[in-house]
Each structure stands twice: as C-alpha cells, then as structure tokens.
Image (cartoon, rainbow, N blue to C red):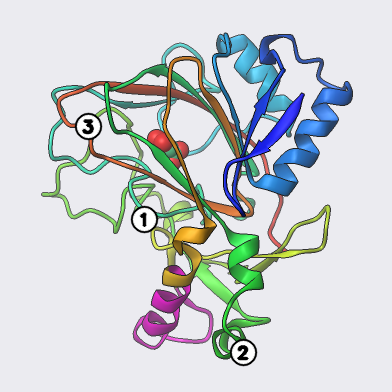
Amino acid sequence: MRFNPLTGHTGAEVDRIDLAKLAPDGDQAHALRDGLDRFGVLVFRAQDVDLAAQKRLTEVFGPILRVPYITPSPEDPDVIAVLKEADEVRVSIFGGDWHSDFSFLEKPPGGSVLVARDLPPYGGDTLWANQIAAWETLPDDLRGKVEGRAAIHVGAPYGVAHAPPPDLRVSRSVKMTRGDPAADREIPHPIAREQISTGRKALFVNPIYTTRIEGHSHGESADILDRLYRHATRPEFICRLRWSPGTVAIWDNRTTLHYAINDYDGHRRLLHRTTFAGERPV
Ligand code: SIN
C-alpha cells in the first residue's frame, strides 16, 4: 500500500490495496487510520466495494453512526444515498457549502466513507480543506480573538446552506427531518479542536452550522467568522476530487471541511455514504 499526497496539505490517493479484502485489524487497517490522521482525506480508485464491504471499511475507523435527521437509504439503515436526480435542476443540494458534517451534534461524526455509484459525465466534484493547516497558519490577530473560545453550532439548516426558506427549492432526493428542537438548540464547541492522536489543533467552525461565537451576538461574531471561513478555505488547504467509477473517499470530519459542487444539472449523481462515530470535541 502506498500513500501518494494529492496536495501540500490535504488528501492522499492510496494505491496497491483492495478495500473489499481489508482485514479489520491488520497492518493495512492500522496504516489507513494513521494515514487519515495525517492527510485528512484518503482516496482509492477502481475499487469493487458493495454495501457490506463499505460498512466493514467504515468500522475500521469507528462504530457506524446512524446519522439522525436524515432518512437513510431504503437498502440499508446505515447508509445515506447522496443523490440528485437528473430532473432536479436549480435546487440547493445536501452539503453544497463548506461544512463539517452535523457539527451541531454533541458528538459530531468522526468521519465518513463515500462510494461512487452513478456519476454525471462531468462535474459533481467534492472539495476538502485541511483545518489543521488552517489553524496553524491563522494570522496572530485573528488567533488572539478566538483562542480558548467556543463557537455555537445549530442544526436548523440540516446540511443545506443557510437554512433555506420554505420557498427555496431543495433537492428532494436527500430527505431531512426538520424542526426538531434537539437539533435546533445551540451547542458550543471549541473553535480550536484537538486531534486526539497528535495533540495538534484544527479550526472547527463552518458556514452551514456555526452561528456565532459564545459570549457574542450574531452581529458581533459575523466579521470574525467571515475572516475565519475565508482563511479556512484558502486554495492551498484544498484538494479537489474528480470522481470516477469505483472511487472511494474517506474523510476525517474532525479536521477537514468539505463542499459538494452542484454543477451537473440534467445528470444523475448517486454516492453511498456511511458515517463513523466521533467524540465530543475538546
Ligand atoms: C456530503 O456532504 O456528505 C456529501 C459530499 C458529496 O456529495 O460530495
């Protein structure tokens, strides 16, 4: 097995491995866990991974999490079908802005495994941005404003940018339960979150779910959050994945942000996502 970095900070393509044959506690599984800590995103090409193998792969990184508020795939309650149909044009999609999945949970997901099933002929790429690099290069004045502080996360948008008003058309293909008071309450998480295995810190805010800095109003927080988001998504922290048949991606939801690009109207895109549990950010 070989890790080939995709960019200076984010992602590695892993080759010489057959994910369908991965032993859950062998040397390769250990190396993949270390690789995910190091690169934030792992990409595998031309794999033959059915849903059972996808779930076994997910469990290498942690117990499978049935993500709340999303209707799972009818094929399997542990799987989310990330789908936009060809006839869904000019709609807002699930994950279509920079975010860390469900950061509003007390214990946000540790990460996810995404497997390409049906791809558009062009577009539908996914971006990830490394938030350890973002924290470690934060300008001193900005760091001084947020170090040791918490940010508030709220579930109301449920993965679609900026809590869409009822008249905004949202893809019908990923169904979300909205208006649950348990998701819509405010949850504070540290703005700099520790990576448990290394003690390094990652910036942990995102424009879908973070609403304000604890102890400040929304208005007072807006400028600082905007500066944090602009820094967090600088091009040098980003890798861009062009999906192809058999591509599998695994990401660390604690130390990366991601963004699903919605530029393939008129074509179907289906990926299967499984998610592994995480811990309360410290
Ligand atoms: C997600 O945010 O889980 C979806 C990513 C994608 O569709 O590329």
Q: Secondary structure at mark 2?
A: helix
For residue 91, which quarter of the picture? top left
Identify the magenta region. 212-229
Q: Position of residue 101 (x, y in %)?
A: 50, 47
Q: Is residue 162 above or below residue 192?
A: above
Q: Which residue is mark 2?
A: 144
Q: Which residue is disc 3 drawn over?
A: 264
Q: Residue 98 is drawn in which quadrant? A: bottom left
Considering only vertical position in the picture, is 198 above or below 88?
A: below
Does the beta carbon at disc 2 come under 8 Å from ligand 1? no
The Cα atoms of the two marked residues, 1 and 2, are separated by 29 Å
Residue at image position (29%, 33%) is 123
Q: Secondary structure at mark 1?
A: loop
Q: Point out residue 99 in the picture as x, y percentages from the top left corner.
A: 45, 53
Q: Nearer the viewer, residue 71 or 182?
A: 71
Occupied quadrant, residue 270: top left
Three-letter amino acid code at disc 1? Answer: Ala
Asked if disc 1 and disc 2 are in contact, CB closer than 8 Å, the reply is no
Position of the N terminus, as image quadrant, is top right
Question: Would residue 213 be found to the left or right of residue 11 on screen?
Answer: left
Q: Nearer the viewer, mark 2 or mark 3?
A: 3
Q: Quadrant of the C terminus?
A: bottom right
Of marks 3 and 1, the one in the foreground = 3
Q: Is residue 219 magenta?
A: yes
Is 122 included in the stretch rendered in magenta?
A: no
Q: CA distance from mark 3 to mark 1?
A: 26 Å
Please name the residue that numbered disc 1 is placed on: 156
Q: Do residues under tags 3 and 1 come within 8 Å of each other at their CB atoms?
A: no
